[in-house]
Image (cartoon, rainbow, N blue to C red):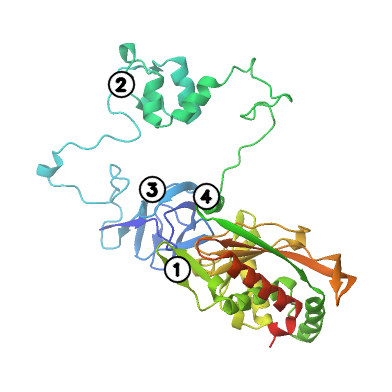
Amino acid sequence: MSIELKMPALSPTMEEGTLARWLVKEGDTVSSGDLIAEIETDKATMEFEAVDEGVITQLLVPEGTDGVKVGTVIAIIQGEDDDATAAPKAAAPVAAKEPKPAAVAAAPAPAPVTTPVATPSHCSGDRIKASPLAKRIAANSGVDLAGISGTGPNGRIVKADVERSTKNTVSAELVEARPTADSRPSTGSGLTVDGGDIPHEVVKLSNMRKTIARRLTESKQQVPHIYLTVDVRLDALLKLRGELNASLEPRGIKLSVNDMLIKALGLALIQVPKCNVSFAGDNMLQYSRADISVAVSVPTGLITPIVTDAANKSLSKISTEIAELAGRAKEGKLQPHEYQGGTASISNMGMMGIKQFEAVINPPQAMIMAIGAGEKRPYIVDDALAIATVMSATGSFDHRAIDGADGAQLMKVFKELVEKPLGLVA
């Protein structure tokens, strides 16, 4: 029998993905466990294995196709017990089901999606009757006029027909308002709002970038952010880091400042549990473990691998774990459980010279710590003005879940742990 291979859900939240690459071709014989495709999710590119044996008779989704919904049939396998030479059913590209009995097959079939069965009244041979405005709207929206029924004189396609087809009056308004190339209004520097004659290229968004755009927009729209900043003296932490690295050198481990800040945030969340929470409508999730999501920049955007139970891990363990997770993150090889979840996040842009910034909360988490650069500044040390290495740390808190006073307490504890860093190794 024919076996349908469907777009898999490679993570609990995955709704669609990109079929990045086929690893087989039609006619290939596969066994259970063979790799057949690479699927790109919003966070990583993952391999898809066959779970049945047989011959690949149809690849229904071309490689590189975006927005393939979970559950969509992407290929057909002919089971080994069947006649593998039988031609696949071309009339049913989305399901390899047996033909219906004659009495049932007499029911009217749905119209094909891609090509009209009969030539519409607005088509005359290869010529389509449409108003110039309707043609411009269709071209701007990527709409095929051949699939639209015209309501104008003699079946002519008019503006309203295209708008009704696309269900997008915005594109029609943009086209209608757009001036001709010879009369485009200038903004004062010869620029136009649609790019006009400015040299540019259209860059296709990756699934990761689409997800980042959607989730962070939702965060800023739905989560009331409160920002709290403290200046933290780093001299003692830097001194301890140097001593620890000297002792860890034979083991090939080199601690970064960020490794130590991850540990400090984990401990602070355990000491101030009111900040180790998630807002859940009528409920609050109170976490007893601090899992820290660490922002890592990758070529396609940003991903946050997780250091689980950061408060109870040694600095050397955190360091080796982060190095390994960050490396696989940049290769797109993280598993969903390694970047989904977490109770709070840390984002460090100090290595790029950023003095201070306010990070956007990553729901359902309720806080994120933004770390700025450590720099020499005038600072009061033992009641006297001195020069110290100081960084600014800004906590972003979900005010629905965390009161300002509790956020301030977390920042206070974090500052103390960094300025008296022996607590990180105790």
Q: Quadrant of residue 313?
A: bottom right
**Is residue 245 shown left or right of residue 279?**
right
Label 4 belongs to which residue? Answer: 221
First along the sequence among labels 4 and 3: 3
Task: Provide residue 299's location: percent of width, then percent of height.
Answer: 64, 55
* Whole-number angstrom distance, CA of label 4 to CA of label 3: 39 Å
Closer to the observer: label 3 or label 2?
2
Residue 272 higher or lower than 396, as above or below: below
Q: Position of residue 166 (x, y in %)?
A: 40, 31
Q: Report which residue position mark 3 lands on.
A: 60
Between residues 7 and 360, which one lies in front from this camera angle? 360
SS at circle 3: loop
Quarter occupied by the N terminus: bottom left
* Alpha carbon distance from label 2 to label 4: 45 Å
Give me the disc on residue 405.
Answer: none
Q: Secondary structure at mark 2?
A: loop
Observer-nearest of 226 and 216: 226
